[in-house]
Image (tube, rainbow, N blue to C red):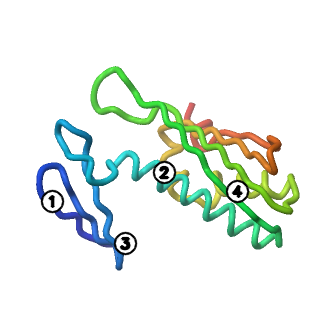
Amino acid sequence: MEFKTVWKEGMIFKSKIGKHVITMDSQPPLGNDKGTNPKELLAASLAGCIGMDVVGLLKKYRQSIYKFVIETKINQSTGGYPIVFDEVELLLSIDGEINEDMVVEAARLAHTKYCGVSAMLAHSVPIHWRVILNGKEVGTGISEQYLSHE
């Protein structure tokens, strides 16, 4: 993977990745909020990576997904710089004709085997996850990579 990130003005940076351009900026007073900030982008990458792996596995298991929403909540450090993620919580809400055991297994595998973003982050921050299937909580977990470093 190779791409360039170019400073435009103020705190605005643009990364061209393949055919796509991502704009990053910071909040006022330093920036003008004309793009997402890098930590938000990292968090969105985690949710997207987990989501893609869960969908891929559920399709492999021949499950029918009607709706899938991932809510991300991150606590950040407050004791000085750098400000880093202290804890990540992902709520995976899925509706469909899906077997409970299969969706929990798909979430577990996404976090422990397939999602490279999760694997990288989990070495430094706990990633807690919950699966809600058709309105009912069916499984929870924490990144095993983080547990192995405690």
On the image, the x and y values in percent for residue 90 come to 61, 43
Side of 21 relative to 103 (left or right): left
Residue located farthest toward the bottom when viewing the structure as drawn: 19
Q: Point out the tag, 4 or 3, that comes first from the N-terminus.
A: 3
Q: Residue at x 18, y 36 (%)?
A: 29
Q: Point out the tag, 2 or 1, that comes first from the N-terminus.
A: 1
Q: How many marks?
A: 4
Residue labelled with disc 4: 109
Q: Nearer the viewer, mark 1 or mark 3?
A: 1
Please tell me the numbered disc located at residue 7: 1
Residue located farthest toward the left when viewing the structure as drawn: 9
Q: How far apart are the alpha carbons under marks 1 and 3?
A: 20 Å
On the image, the x and y values in percent for residue 103 come to 79, 56
Q: How far apart are the alpha carbons under marks 1 and 4?
A: 38 Å
The answer to whether 115 is drawn above or below residue 92 in the figure is below
Q: How far apart are the alpha carbons under marks 2 and 4?
A: 15 Å
- Label 4 residue SS: helix
Please tell me the numbered disc located at residue 120: 2
Q: Point out the tag, 1 or 4, that comes first from the N-terminus.
A: 1
Q: Nearer the viewer, mark 2 or mark 1?
A: 1
Amino acid found under the numbered disc labelled 1: Trp
- Label 1 residue SS: strand
Q: Circles 2 and 4: CB distance less than 8 Å?
A: no
Residue labelled with disc 3: 1
The answer to whether 101 is drawn above or below residue 129 in the figure is below
The part of the image, by quadrant, that contains residue 147 is: top right
Q: How far apart are the alpha carbons under marks 2 and 1?
A: 26 Å
Near mark 2 (Cα within 10 A), the count class, few <14, some 14-19 or many ≥20, is few
Near mark 3 (Cα within 10 A), the count class, few <14, some 14-19 or many ≥20, is few
